[in-house]
Amino acid sequence: MAQLGTLEELPLEYREALAKQSTGPLWPMMRNVLPHDRPSAISKPHLWSYEHIRPLLLRAGELTPVEKAERRVLVLADPGRGEGAMQVTSSIYCGLQLLLPGEKAPAHKHTPSAARIIVEGEGAYTIVDGEKCVMQHGDLVLTPGGMWHDHGHEGDQPVIWLDALDLPLFVYLEGSYAVEGEFQTPRNRPDSSMLEYAEAGLVPTRAPGSARAKYPQLRYPWSKTRAGLEKLAAYTDRGRAVELDYVNPETGEPCLPTMGFTAMMLAAGDKVRAPVTSSSNVFHVIDGAGSSTVNGKTVNWKRGDTFSAPVFSEIDHQAGGKDPAFLIRIHDRPLQEKIGFYEERGRA
Ligand code: 1HN
């Protein structure tokens, strides 16, 4: 590659004249935005330990009533971006949210899309445009952009879940805002994962020309996901992760426009070498324990933990010795595919 000229090589008086016209030379900056062969990630891989964060979140429950927080969340901040970073990777925001028994978090809707993965506790629910989704351990519950959502808790122990949003993308686009509303009255029926989409491969019959809902399924119960992984694992070679993508059951498309969710199972003791992907990844541990090496840095993880891998990371996983491990991988492959860019590379 040609060695490009530097800023310092240019006469000061010329640089000042350029700045005065709000212009600048491309060539000294070009390699910063177009590095050779692969991007240089800003994000740093990191593990957020549930064991360590849980007591801090419960303390937030004592310090700040939900009325003063609207959403009582501890944000997972990418160490590559420093304190206060409202993102885990380039495009993904995550936070751990606490709702105490009897509490309600008021309705709002916003431009970014969100999904929640339930970490702990029973009895909470989210109402999404009138559909009441109960929240059980490992469930994925969607609140797509533009849809009203409020949370409530009818149980007797704290409930904690992981929020994932495409917020950084909307902030980047200067497109992020919310509208506040009233608590919703739920329709008196189970959510569609228990009715219309209770069985894979079957969808409700429809009259010709009648419209399909844009987001027909808002809750993906973990019990079904886990059963699906276990069945597939029985016929999957060792050394490969068993992975199932969360999709819109009517279209087969990713369940949200920009964020992808992939359930993973690692067989007990299995070592898995993941392909290098252009998507960034956030891994949340639903069950089991193990370790992963991301770009040479090893993290030991267990149930409730969350860890990140920037774009183009080299990732190896190993499940603990006696039980399989189950994780949900949050990524931005759907966004990257929409802009014609998603890429996977083999490993040496
Ligand atoms: C949001 O709406 C929720 O509805 C949680 O629970 C976290 C973080 C940033 C922006 C909106 C929720 C959020 C959020």
Image (cartoon, rainbow, N blue to C red):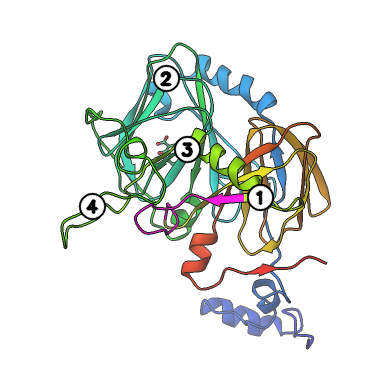
Q: Nearer the viewer, residue 245 or 201?
A: 201
- Mark 2 or mark 3, whichever is nearer to me: 2
Label 4 residue near ligand 1, CB within 8 Å: no
Give the residue type that dot 1 points to: Tyr
Numbered badge on residue 92? none
Cα separation, mark 4 vs mark 3, equals: 29 Å
Q: Residues within 10 Å of mark 1 (few under 14, many from 20)?
A: few
Residue 285, position as x, y percentages in the image: 64, 36
Residue reaching furthest bottom?
Answer: 2
Up/down of 322 relative to 85, above or below? above
Left/right placement of residue 104 relative to residue 269 reads: left
Cα separation, mark 1 vs mark 2, equals: 36 Å
What stretch of residues is rendered in magenta?
243-256
- The answer to which quarter of the image holds residue 74 is top right
Up/down of 117 relative to 160, above or below? below
Numbered badge on residue 205? 4
Label 1 sits on residue: 235
| Mark 3 secondary-structure assignment | strand
Measuring 25% from the left and 35% from the top, which residue is drawn there?
Answer: 130
- The answer to which quarter of the image holds residue 106 is top left
Q: Earlier in the sequence, mark 4 or mark 2?
A: 2
Label 3 sits on residue: 116
Residue 37, position as x, y percentages in the image: 73, 76
- Mark 4 or mark 2, whichever is nearer to me: 4
